């Protein structure tokens, strides 16, 4: 199987990577990322889809039955190992020296 | 006494109007999310549940509305034909004898795991020695999820 293509990275994409890197290895929902970064849903979900297709992010459903939960299940995203390395490279390239200060 | 009565009435009516507005916003936002998810080429059920859950996590009615309008944009981006396919529409093309060609295949510039194929079916018209032109009969778009 061919390796996934590298996704293009916008400013918002870099911000999303930074948000996941700060939370790593914790998982975040789209709603939590929006709250943390102030990015709109229209921008966020295509970015999440791109990074997931590139295997920089992985996602899984919240445990539990929607009927028992009484609401739809949340989808949790987390950086993969590859994604964490790529995120560090990307942020180091855009803002050199900032990662060590966080 | 009258002033107190009108103040109470005003408060009660205000509460009713606010509650109705809030319920209306919630219903409209859910409708927008359902419509947007339904227009996706793939993963409709996944995105519907995910977006409804995230909509549920928005606190105020206005936040829910903004979220839902954003989802309309997100679904439009996710189902957008490949940029390369759009570019191909403006390119000169060479047609084979069967008058059917595939202009471009297996492109995924949005990097969302979807390949977009476009096929143009054309017919050659010959109206004399020099007046030859192609008529486009059909344009087919096909999208499929590629292996991850």
Image (cartoon, coloured by chain):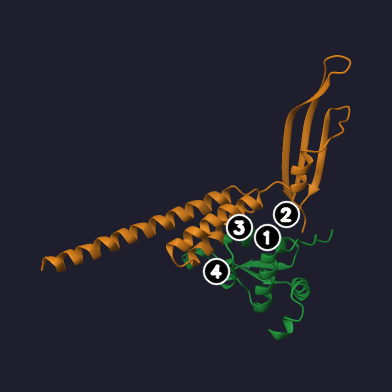
Give the letter of the green chain: A
Mark 1 and 4 residues: CB-CB less than 8 Å, in contact? no
Q: Which mark is residue A49?
A: 1
Quarter where residue B62 is shown: bottom left
Q: CA distance from mark 4 to mark 2?
A: 32 Å
Tell whether A98 sits left or right of B63. right
User: Which residue of the protein is positioned furthest toward the top in this rendering?
Assistant: B128
Mark 3 and 2 residues: CB-CB less than 8 Å, in contact? no
Q: CA distance from mark 3 to mark 2?
A: 19 Å
Q: How many marks?
A: 4
Circle nearer the viewer, 3 or 2 = 2
Q: Residue B20 in the image: state x and y as whole percent.
A: 34, 57
Residues at discs 4 and 3 both on one chain = no
Q: Is residue B42 visible?
A: no
What crowding class fits label 1: few (fewer than 14 Cα within 10 Å), some (14-19), or many (20 or more)? some
What crowding class fits label 2: few (fewer than 14 Cα within 10 Å), some (14-19), or many (20 or more)? many
Residue position marked by numbered label 3 in the rendering? B46
Q: CA distance from mark 1 to mark 4?
A: 24 Å
Question: Which is more toward the observer, B120 or A102?
Answer: A102
Residue position marked by numbered label 4 in the rendering? A64
Question: Which is more toward the observer, A6 or B89?
Answer: B89
Tell me which chain the residue with mark 4 is part of.
A
Q: Is residue B138 visible?
A: yes
Q: CA distance from mark 4 to mark 3?
A: 15 Å
Tell whether B23 sits left or right of A8. left
Residues at discs 4 and 2 both on one chain = no
Q: Residue B81 in the image: state x and y as whole percent.
A: 70, 46
What tint does the image give chain B?
orange
Circle nearer the viewer, 1 or 3 = 1
Q: Is residue B16 above or below residue A18?
A: above
Q: CA distance from mark 1 to mark 2?
A: 9 Å
Q: Is residue B2 above or below residue B118?
A: below
């Amino acid at each position: 199987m061919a390796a996934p293509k590298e996704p293009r990275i916008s400013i918002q994409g870099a911000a999303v990577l930074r948000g996941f890197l700060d939370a790593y290895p914790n998982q975040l929902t789209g709603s939590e990322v929006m709250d943390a970064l102030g990015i709109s849903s229209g921008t966020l979900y295509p970015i999440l889809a791109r990074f997931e297709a590139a295997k920089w992010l992985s996602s899984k459903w919240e445990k539990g039955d929607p009927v028992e939960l009484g609401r739809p299940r949340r989808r949790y995203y987390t950086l993969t190992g590859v994604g964490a390395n790529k995120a560090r490279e990307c942020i180091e390239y855009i803002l050199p020296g900032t990662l060590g200060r966080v | 006494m009258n002033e107190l009565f009108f103040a109470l009435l005003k408060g009660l009516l205000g509460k009713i109007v606010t509650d109705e507005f809030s319920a209306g916003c919630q219903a409209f936002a859910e409708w927008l999310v359902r419509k947007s998810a339904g227009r996706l080429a793939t993963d409709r059920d996944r995105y519907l549940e995910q977006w409804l859950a995230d909509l549920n996590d928005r606190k105020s009615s206005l936040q829910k509305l903004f979220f839902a309008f954003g989802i309309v944009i997100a679904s439009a981006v996710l189902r957008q034909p490949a940029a390369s396919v759009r570019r191909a529409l403006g390119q000169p093309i060479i047609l084979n004898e069967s008058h059917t060609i595939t202009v471009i295949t297996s492109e995924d510039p949005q990097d969302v795991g979807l390949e977009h194929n476009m096929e143009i079916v054309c017919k050659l018209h010959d109206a004399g020695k020099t007046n030859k032109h192609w008529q486009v009969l059909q344009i087919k778009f096909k999208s499929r999820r590629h292996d991850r």
